[in-house]
Image (spheres, grey):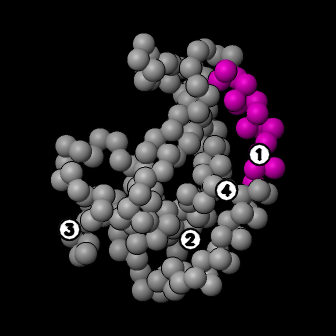
Amino acid sequence: MPSSLMPQGLTPVPARLRILATPAPRAIRRGIDLTAGMALLVLTLPLFLVTALAIRLNGPGPVFRAEPHLREDGRTFLLLAFRSLTAGPTGGGAGLTGLGRLIEMIRLDQLPILLNLLRGDLTLIGPSPEPLTGRSRHVPENWAADAALPMKPGLSGWCAVN
């Protein structure tokens, strides 16, 4: 698909990165993802637990929020983050809490993404995951099948490592 026809935020895979989609590098990459994910989770576990406890004590509602995102094969996955909004009457967010403002400011709300890395939804380096929320007004209904990412989405984008 030409890059001019792709939804905003999706970019074609550079030719030098296409080798990463073959089976042998994919297994090596998964091993690196698991090793790095476990190491990062162990290092951040105290922050993870303190943040989860603070959110639980701050008010009603779940500790995590899960937003649907697009995978490389056209399927969706739920990207996890700590909840920073107050729970509204229907379960949706009603407004940013004081604690939510703090955890977003120092980016602690993104720690649960490590769980997505360990589950295999993400890799360390790849294209940004494409969110599915708010897209139905802008693109056709069947866009997810046509706009599947060329490779697994990543925690850190290509631009950060190039």
Mark 4 Cα within 10 Å, few/some/many (few <14, many 20+)?
some
Question: Taking 3 as reference, is 75 left or right?
Answer: right
Mark 3 vs mark 4, CA separation in Å:
32 Å
Q: Position of residue 95 (x, y in %)?
A: 44, 20
Q: Which residue is mark 1?
A: 44
User: SS of the residue at dot 3?
Assistant: helix
Compared to residue 141, the image places residue 32 above or below, namely below
Residue type at tag 2: Val
Which of the image's four quarters has the N terminus?
bottom left
Which residue has dot 3 on it? 5
Q: Position of residue 69 (x, y in %)?
A: 43, 50
Instruction: Report crowding for label 1: few under 14, some 14 to 19, many 20 or more residues within 10 A (C-alpha).
Output: some
Identify the residue at image location x=23%, y=56%: 142
Hey, what amino acid is under mark 4? Leu
Residue bearing the label numbered 2: 161
Q: Nearer the viewer, mark 2 or mark 3?
A: 3
Q: Are marks 4 and 2 in contact (CB under 8 Å)?
A: no
What is the distance, in whole Å, between disc 2 and disc 1 at their CAs?
Answer: 22 Å
Left-right relation of 24 to 133: right
- Residue to which mark 4 is pinned: 118
Q: Earlier in the sequence, mark 4 or mark 2?
A: 4
* Magenta stretch bounds: 40-56
Mark 3 crowd level (few <14, some 14–19, many ≥20, 10 Å Cα): few
